[in-house]
Image: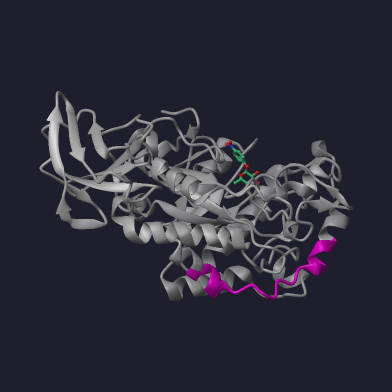
Amino acid sequence: MDNAIRAGRSQREGVQQDPRLDWWRDAKFGMFIHWGLYAIPAGIWKGAEIPGIGEWIMYRAQIPVREYEQLAKEFNPVQFDAAQWVSLAKRAGQKYMVITAKHHDGFCLFDSKVTDYDVVDATPFGRDILKELAAECQRQGMRLGFYYSQTQDWHHPDGDGNSWDYDESQKDFAGYVENYVKPQVRELLSHYGPVCLIWFDTPKGMTAPQSRSLVELVHELQPECLVCGRVGNDMGDYASAGDNQIPAAAVALDWETPATINDTWGYKSYDHNWKSVPDLVHKLVDIVSKGGNYLLNVGPTAEGVIPLPSVERLLAMGAWLEANGEAVYGTRPGPVQGLAWCRTTQKDGCIYLHVFEWPADGALRVPGLAGRVSAAYLLTDLARLLQVGAAADDLLVQGPAVAPDPTDTVVVLRV
Ligand code: JFZ
């Protein structure tokens, strides 16, 4: 097992057995959405650029609760359109969406009865974002999950993390879990239809009984709802890699890499370090070839707009997947691992050879597959068979001289 992956208990006991995860194992690609009050300062507080990820601005600038919560009065994302967001995810080829119901700053994107610090009660916008997204996901056939920060809450006097407003030694963390976290998790799983997963995060000092009781609460309310491994204490239905971390080799667990397109989760006005489309496609395929899922983040602006550089990249990934999705969705790690120039996935009697670096003469040489392949062709040109041969243990396939797809040409090997 890779160090970057935190295993859930179910994984260690029976690898990839639980049928509740079947859809998730086939999905491969999801949209993460980090959205909240931090989109308003967008990385700048009182004129200063605050280092680090955008959604941590309250912590990094040690902004007092009474000051930070004033942002709610400005939160009015009139351009928010759930239909557009869901349709973007669909066009990107993403099969599930996960949005921050409550991040570490404590602000809730849903109408919670246990606090007024939420989008309905505290903002001029006054609309339940999660309700609108849930309805739209139902309409467009998209699965929806919720990120929920169960330990850190810098707004709640008993939540973890805020030592500049509150005396950490006086906190009743257990009371916060019982009387605040659990009622909110109950709300999320009772008022928004089927929830595909709850993405808990940064468990920190959460005890094993506390983690277990959250897992049990989720499964009691919605047995099909998955729980991310970041619920803590080696529990949860699937494992989560460190942010933007991709393990070096295939991992025989249910696992996922959460990742950013630039360098922040929550919107920052001055983060322009966007990854390229080929880089993003390679990361997706690399992860899938190692048995994982790619949960790729967007950070909408305070107006409710997903930044154009994100939209452009997601649409380009969607176009690539439109042509090559067969070699991604529903696949499992392929038999050839550890080569720099290619990745492999497989399903239904096919090995999919993903060629990242096309050889100059089009002569593909794949170690270990000699004698196993009955036919080879490009996924985007099913009619033309490629010439197949062998040299010792290596499979030889003669492809076109020039890379048909400079990003990733998929060669189908029938076995
Ligand atoms: C957490 C959050 O603190 C962050 O704001 C964001 O939501 C991200 C998706 O998750 O940050 C983490 C959590 C775990 C690791 C790294 C960053 N980790 O295990 O490497």
x and y percent of residue 281 in the render?
A: 44, 49
Total labels drawn: 0
Q: Is residue 397 visible?
A: yes
Give the percent coordinates (x, y) of residue 409.
32, 48
Nearer to us in this view, 202 or 301:
301
> Residue 165 vs residue 80: left or right?
right
In the picture, which quadrant includes the C terminus?
A: top left
Q: How is the image coloured?
A: one colour
Residue 75 magenta-highlighted: yes
Looking at the image, which residue is at 61% across and 48% down?
262
- In the rendered image, residue 272, in percent from the top left (x then y), is placed at 67, 51
Residue 158 visible, this orientation: no
The correct choice, above or below, for 168 with respect to 303 in the image is: above
Give whichever of 125, 304 is nearer the camera: 304
Residue at x 35% of width, y 30% of height: 339
Compared with 11, 102 (above or below) is below
Q: Which residue lies most toward the top here? A: 392
Ligand 1 quarter of the rendering: top right
Residue positioned 82% across, 69% down in the render: 73
Q: Nearer the viewer, residue 97 or 176?
A: 97
Query: Would you say 10 lies left or right of 234 here?
Result: left
Magenta-tinted stretch: 70-87
Q: Position of residue 99 (x, y in %)?
A: 57, 59
- Magenta span: predominant SS is helix
Residue 317 is one of the magenta-drawn residues: no
Quadrant occupied by the N terminus = top left
